[in-house]
Image: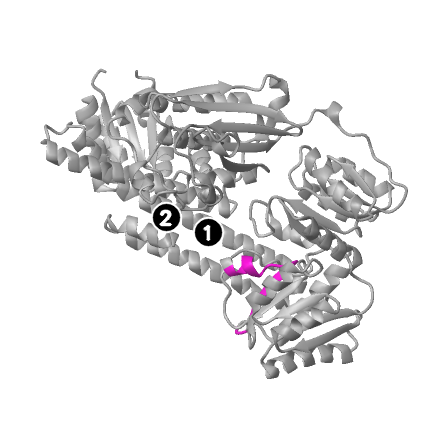
Amino acid sequence: MNLIVLVLCATSFAGLGALLLAYLGARKRGGELEKSLAQALEQIAQDESALQKRKQLDTLKDEFISTVSHELRTPLTSIRGALGLLSAGVMGKVDDKALNLLRIASTNTDRLVRLINDILDLERMDTGSAPLHLRRCNLNEVVKQAADTMRSMAEDHDILIDIVPEAKTDAIAFDGDPDRMQQVLVNLLSNAIKFSPNGSTILVVSTLDGNNLLLRIEDTGRGVPADKLETIFDRFQQVEPSDSRQKGGTGLGLAICRSILVQHGGTIWAERNDAHDSTRAGMTFTLRLPRLIAASEVMPLPVAPQGAILVVDDDAGVRQVVAEQLRRHGYTVLETDRGEQAVQIAERQHVEAILLDLYMPGLPGWQTIELLKKNPATANIPVVILSVLSPAANTLDSTQLLSSAQGWVQKPFHESLLLAELGRVLHVGTGPGRILLVEDDEDLASVVLSSFEIERQQGHDEQQIGIHHVSNAADAKHFCLNGPPDILILDLTLPDGSGFELVNWLRQQPNLRTLPLVVYSGREVTGAEMEQLRLGPTQFLTKARVQPKDVEELVLAMMRHLRQPGLETRPAYPAITRP
Amino acid sequence: MPTRRILIIDDEDDIREVAALSLESVAGWQVSTASSGAEGMRLAAAELPDAILMDVMMPAMDGPTTFREMQKLPELASIPVILLTAKVQGVDQRRFAGLGVTAVLFKPFDPLTLAEQMSEALGWS
């Protein structure tokens, strides 16, 4: 959909349409290139080369974005310049009708420039080529600067920006990219100004909330309908389609804001003011950022009498919720808010599994896991990442993380999902492995089965794997209900419904929703479909691209990895997570 | 503002023209233009302008190369150079800043304030 909008915008400028199509075409090719990583299965033993390939691809993308950016801006520079000079009357007097046309052309050029800037911004964040430049920041100062920037726009609309800073200024430091955070605030303030009635006040309130900083921006405008409070953060999702024309927005502002917050380990959400008080008009956008914790506030080292689950998260609220859920299910829980301490605890005490947040002050999660896996005393403890990031996000090197962690639960999470994932990492590795192949093509199924059979006859099967085959969704459900397999290999086209429906059903079963899955489909799976198909660790293979033998190798590698956390020094299988 | 003499170096005819018009009609400066780094260096040596506004991406000799070549010639080395670029990525910005040019301005520029931005960067205001 976005693509159509883009192309429509662009066709009004000669040449730009073609460029954008070229750009989008290359994006698509980029997607295929990534998928071709799946072909690199033979290189499981040479994962470094796969990693290198991925890096090369990212570099290519970066160069491409940089070039497109330049190629789009160059003609726009001439257009904007010429229109600007003409409409300012610098080149002589222009009559009113012509002036109006020039003004239209001029504002729309500005809109196109903003659109290009925003698209490139998002693209860079997606590819991870816009890293944060972290510095120690103070929330009150960032707010003040953003408000100063927006002051003149607010005055034009006769609107007052009223800042209510947190009184404990020392406590509201955070490690962030001040330019990026300013970008977020300027964006939110500009929205608030655009949609507020003249003469009104916009309230900006910063507060301390445990280990988080909260920033609320409250307006008294028309507000967003309750059913759109979440979708407004999607790309090109404005409340009224006419908003982009009338208010001059690009439809990408809030998507950019959310990306930036997520990069900072924070969140952003929107609420209607009448949800709390029916007499109040307008909207409140709230930002939550993890704050820095002073050394004196570090928690004392906890001690557990027997095997325990270690919860590592700097957010006391999250720790409390997780600990409570786990204790209710009979687990002993240890908590810490820092990575350094997590390593110490895991070294000295009997820790059965670790739930690890990624963004923490001090040692972040991705470095903590590295230390844990390097240390022989802790290398075998399964780690489940507990993060606002999805494993498909690219703000971090998720390839690296996916290969060292045994599980992943995305925040906000449902209790049963957390328990299922924890249960899975704790209980793998006992008894012979069970693999379920769901495939309606009998010939293909028998080839895959015999590929595992050969492996067994050759005596390579040190893992004692049993593979079972069913040819429709109903049998698959029946099999799973009788005991979850260790890995599910799934064809997408089945006689009694699609693989999508089966995955949907699996997602609703408490003990099956984090099942490791290999999607083995006849066609290329799109990025959006990948999200719909994700269960536990999920891999995608295309029949035309890989041989049944490759399927077997991937499945065995996944099995080894699931059963022997930390024993492998290199990633067990290439992570193909990105659409 | 006193009359200044500016040399614009850009391989894009249209941008040269718009930028020249902007500086001439908004600020009243005298502008000459060159369409390549080599031509720019010849003109700079002949006219010794007060400042040079130069594009980054040009065929044959790009902006940064032209700047480095000029730094080797004593008569050109003291002329302040402002780069005008459509590359806005942070990595590009840092690379340009490291060259030792007076300022880096970004395309698309606002024709009504281009002279003002240059004056500010050059300490002329």
| Residue under label 2 | A68
Task: Residue A406: tell me if it is visible.
Answer: no
Highlighted range, magenta: A529-544
Residue furthest toward the bottom?
A: A443
Q: Residue A165 falls in which quadrant of the image?
A: top right
- Report the Cα–Cα distance between label 2 and label 1: 10 Å
Q: Which dot marks residue A268?
A: none
- Who is closer to the viewer here, A469 or A577? A469
| Residue under label 1 | A61
Residue A311 image offset from top left, x and y in percent: 75, 41
**Which subunit holds the residue at mark 2?**
A
What type is the residue that disc 2 sits on?
A: Val
10 Å crowding of disc 1: few (<14), some (14-19), many (20+): some
Residue at image location 37% in from the left, 44% down from the top: A69
Residue at image location 79% in from the left, 69% down from the top: A463
Residues marked 2 and 1, same chain:
yes
Would you place residue B52 above or below residue A448 in this image?
above
- Who is closer to the viewer here, B28 or A420? A420
